[in-house]
Image: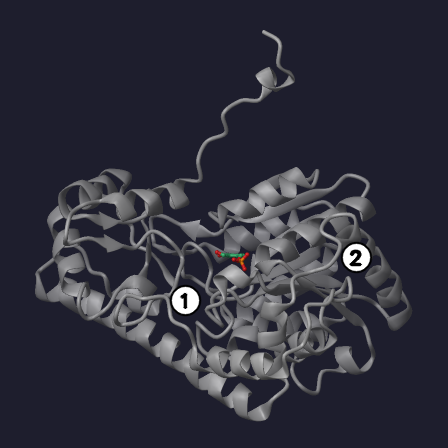
Amino acid sequence: SESIFDVVAQAPEDPILGLNEAFKTDPREKKVNLSIGVYCTEEGKVPLLNVVEKAEQKILEEGAPHTYLPISGLPSFTSGVQKLLFGEDSALIKDKKAVTVQSLGGTGALKVGADFLAQVLPNPEAIVSAPTWQNHVAIFEQAGFEVGSYPYYDKASGEINFPAMLESLKGLKENTVVILHACCHNPTGLDLTQEQWAQVVDVCAAHKLIPFLDIAYQGFGDGLEEDAGAIRQFAASGITFLVANSFSKSFSLYGERIGALTVVCHNSEEASRVMSALKAVIRANYSNPPAHGAKIVGQVLNDPELLAQWHADLKEMRERIKEMRRDLADELKALGAKKDFEFVTRQKGMFSFSGLTPEQVQRLKDEFGVYAVKSGRICVASLNKGNVKYTAEAIKEVL
Ligand code: PLP
């Protein structure tokens, strides 16, 4: 045939977004969507946070025109991000060792970081946890990396196999990019302890690896400060590393595409050169970032009153998730389920690796309208008082 597009193969649909579509068109009245990674309220709705409403009100009152932002983003936003990641009194900030650019969500931060690193490294190689958020692999492969994995989740025990993870890191070539979930690991909900993080930092330093921390759920684990523990340890170590952070979940600003990429350098002179390279990557990609999400988050991070309100909003979301973890485990116990689900209460963030098999996940959907990811990942942030019992009954039936 004649078209240049004849060589274009049909790419597979994203399995999770596909499930979401199937859920929407499912005519059953009783149905529960635990597939997509979105926080919902007790009423089953994506929230408009109080603090976001207030910030938007202020922005509206200012009535400012829609100008371009600088290539690196809104300065009050990027400086606020650094404080959130490293702490108010961070030496890194004072010494101007870290540079931050605004990004299109956490995804955009990973992408700009990957493109930048691909320019710097002669043979770009990256490694992700097994399992991980699938887009990690896709982003780094598209940026020209060879992508491998390190052991993380141990199916048999349902815990992290930390010795295997550490051994694997020790065997890596110098300058391998190590992608790490700083908190609330997606999809397992299992995080390293601070002692284990200290060992990871040591191995990264000793073997000259390049840590790239992805923090998409800061505030959903134990709190904003607590969840930054791993980042603070890397910051104290003196090695260079990268951080991709997202405000999609923590501000419920999914569609505004707001996040940031931060690169920690050896000194301020290096940092200034790195910043110029990041700007070149952005300029030739989307020129400069969108403004609205940055204005909202920037307002909040720089206003003590709004900041306190955000802490409260986050606490509410975090505690509701914890309560749902508790309720799910309790309901399953009360129903006499064949398996103990207490582990769900120890996992962090929006997700839980339930241990359900692909067959059980299929039955949940077909027989009960309960949608989970094939891997057994469920989004506990979509549970509420109105659907947790039904969900538990469904799970009990398919076990
Ligand atoms: N990283 C991880 C581990 C995630 O789970 C997500 C979102 O699901 C992201 C990054 C990216 O988030 P966004 O691009 O929506 O800000």
Residue at label 2?
A: 278
Label 1 sits on what residue type? Gly
Residue at label 1?
A: 349
Q: Residue at x 49, y 72 (%)?
A: 251
Q: Residue at x 28, y 68 (%)?
A: 325
- Percent x, y for residue 304? 58, 92
Against 30, residue 248 (above or below) is below
Label 2 sits on what residue type? Leu
Q: Nearer the viewer, residue 217 or 293?
A: 293
Q: Quadrant of residue 7?
A: top right
Q: How is the image coloured?
A: one colour
For the residues carrying marks 2 and 1, which lies nearer the camera in this image?
Answer: 2
Q: Quadrant of residue 37?
A: bottom left
Marks 2 and 1, Cα distance to the nearest angstrom?
30 Å
What is the residue that sits farthest to the bottom in this orientation?
A: 305
Judge left or right: residue 113 versus residue 391.
right
